[in-house]
Every structure is written in structure tokens, then in C-alpha cells.
Amino acid sequence: MLREMHHTGLSVRNMERSLKLYRDTLGMEVEWDLTIEGIPQFGTIIGLPGVRERIAMMRLSNCRIELFQFFKPKGKKIPRRQCDIGYMHVAMVVDDLDSICRKLKKLGLKFYSKAENLGVYKVVFFKGFDGETIELMMPMIREAKGKS
């Protein structure tokens, strides 16, 4: 039986650029950041013998995203749509959707559409620097405090 989710992993082309998005713009903290090289067991467990990569574990509350940039072997970008098998996205709750969308647009990131009010949440999807899909959700209904 599973106990909890620990993290979601995301392969990125340029770690510094990705840190601008996840740390500097979305507000995640870096739990740790290291380069892995010369550890044969690591290459074995991920199926990439001789791997050399940089990993940054990002955290927001109880959620983590593991960013990894491979130096050896180099990866390639494979575009995916929501309907494609194996597609995944990450969703984050925000307090001020309009403000964060302005910051993301200044970084040159592309949105699927304008934000839409779906009743419980106002939602928007955008593409990160490496083609990853990120969903931002702003609650539209606040729970009444103190009610049982």
C-alpha cells in the first residue's frame, strides 16, 4: 500500500532557466541541488548507465517537483498533447491568478487560452520552458471559517 506521494520528476533542457520559473516566479523552494556523476548504481536504477545529470528538488508545501538536466546522455524533446498516452501535467493552487499570469507572460511563456472561471476554480494552463504543461487554479469559493 502506498504511504504518500513524494515527487514528480521533470527533465529540463536548462536548469538555470527552469529555476527562474519554478523558484523565482512560482515561488517553490530548492530543497537540494546536486550533480550526479560516477555513481554506477544511479545509472543502473534509472536505466541510463554512465549518466551525468544535475538534479534540483523543488518544494511547495507538501508537494515536490524534481527537476533534472541530463548532460550524458542528452535527451530530446518529444511534443505531447493532453490526449497523448503518457502525458502528465502538474496543477498548483494560487491566490492571485492574474498577477502570476502577468509574470509568466513577461518570461515569454505561452498559455493554452485565457483563464476561465469554472465555478469552484478559475483555471489556466500554460507551457513551461521545456514543453511541460502547468495548470494554475485559483479558488473562487472560500470555505467559511469556524463552521463545522
Image (cartoon, rainbow, N blue to C red):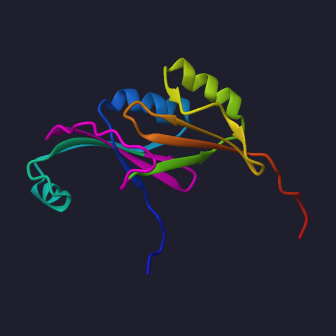
State which quadrant residue 104 falls in: top right
Q: Residue at x 29, y 32 (%)?
A: 13
Magenta segment:
58-86
| Residue 79 as seen in the image, left or right of residue 58 | left
Q: Is residue 135 above or below residue 99?
A: below
Question: x%, y% of residue 71?
Answer: 18, 36
Q: Quadrant of residue 116?
A: top right
Q: Residue furthest right?
A: 147
Residue lying at 56% horizontally and 36% vertically, measured from the top left: 27
Decide if residue 66 is on the left or right side of residue 138. Answer: left
Residue occupying image coordinates x 36% and y 28%: 16
Q: Position of residue 58 (x, y in %)?
A: 44, 45
Question: Magenta segment: does it hold 63?
Answer: yes
Please name whichever residue, 54 or 106, is drawn nearer the observer in this view of the structure. 106
Query: Which x, y percent locates residue 125?
Result: 56, 38
Asked if residue 80 is among those painted magenta in the image, a careful observer would answer: yes
The N terminus is located in which quarter? bottom left
Q: Quadrant of the C terminus?
A: bottom right
Depth order, front residue of 86/28: 86
As rendered, which of 12 and 124 lies closer to the eye?
124
The one nearer the camera, 128 or 54, is 128
